[in-house]
Image: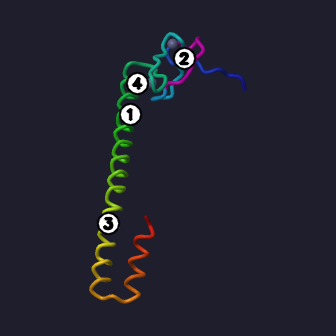
């Protein structure tokens, strides 16, 4: 099998790549090179850019939710530590001090 892919517009011209959006073969005349891939038409290039923006946006959202978690976790630990510290002061028995140690050992 040695059938080279042809351009979707020019059936006699070998394709130099495939449109990243619709997977059609594109020749050197039709190819639109975008920063994020090859497109066969302005429409596809536009769709690709939209997709890229959506994925960037989704990535950003993931990153911000991650950073929120890293802020919340220490606060939660401090709160927990405070609760145990309070309990240890109110009821000074060994098991409470052990719980306190367990919380602060994570730092
Ligand atoms: Zn296309
Ligand atoms: Zn072509």
- Residue that mark 2 sits on: 7
User: CB at mark 2 closer than 8 A to ligand 2?
Assistant: yes
Tell us which disc is closer to us: 4 or 3: 3
The extreme right residue here reads 1
Q: CA distance from mark 4 to mark 3?
A: 47 Å
User: CB at mark 4 closer than 8 A to ligand 1?
Assistant: yes
Q: Secondary structure at mark 3?
A: helix
Q: Earlier in the sequence, mark 2 or mark 4?
A: 2
- Residue that mark 1 sits on: 51
Neighbours of disc 4 within 10 Å: few (<14), some (14-19), many (20+): some
Q: Earlier in the sequence, mark 4 or mark 1?
A: 4
- Residue that mark 3 sits on: 76
Q: Secondary structure at mark 2?
A: loop
Tell us which disc is closer to us: 2 or 1: 1
Q: Position of residue 12 (x, y in %)?
A: 59, 11
Point out the stretch of residues depicted in magenta. Answer: 10-19
Q: Taking 55 as reference, is 82 above or below it?
A: below
Neighbours of disc 2 within 10 Å: few (<14), some (14-19), many (20+): many
Q: Earlier in the sequence, mark 4 or mark 3?
A: 4
In this rendered view, identify the residue nearer to me: 56 or 19: 56
Q: What residue do we see at 35% from left, 31% from top? A: 50
Neighbours of disc 1 within 10 Å: few (<14), some (14-19), many (20+): few
Q: CA distance from mark 4 to mark 1?
A: 10 Å
Q: Position of residue 78 (x, y in %)?
A: 32, 67
């Amino acid at each position: 099998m040695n059938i080279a892919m042809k351009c979707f517009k020019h059936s006699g011209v070998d394709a130099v790549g495939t449109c990243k959006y619709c997977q059609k073969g594109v020749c050197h005349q039709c190819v639109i090179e975008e920063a994020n891939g090859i497109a066969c038409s302005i429409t596809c290039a536009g769709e690709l850019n939209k997709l890229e923006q959506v994925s960037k946006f989704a990535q950003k959202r993931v990153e911000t939710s991650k950073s929120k978690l890293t802020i919340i976790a220490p606060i939660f630990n401090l709160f927990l530590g405070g609760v145990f510290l309070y309990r240890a002061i109110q009821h000074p028995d060994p098991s409470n001090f052990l719980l306190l140690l367990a919380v602060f050992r994570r730092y």
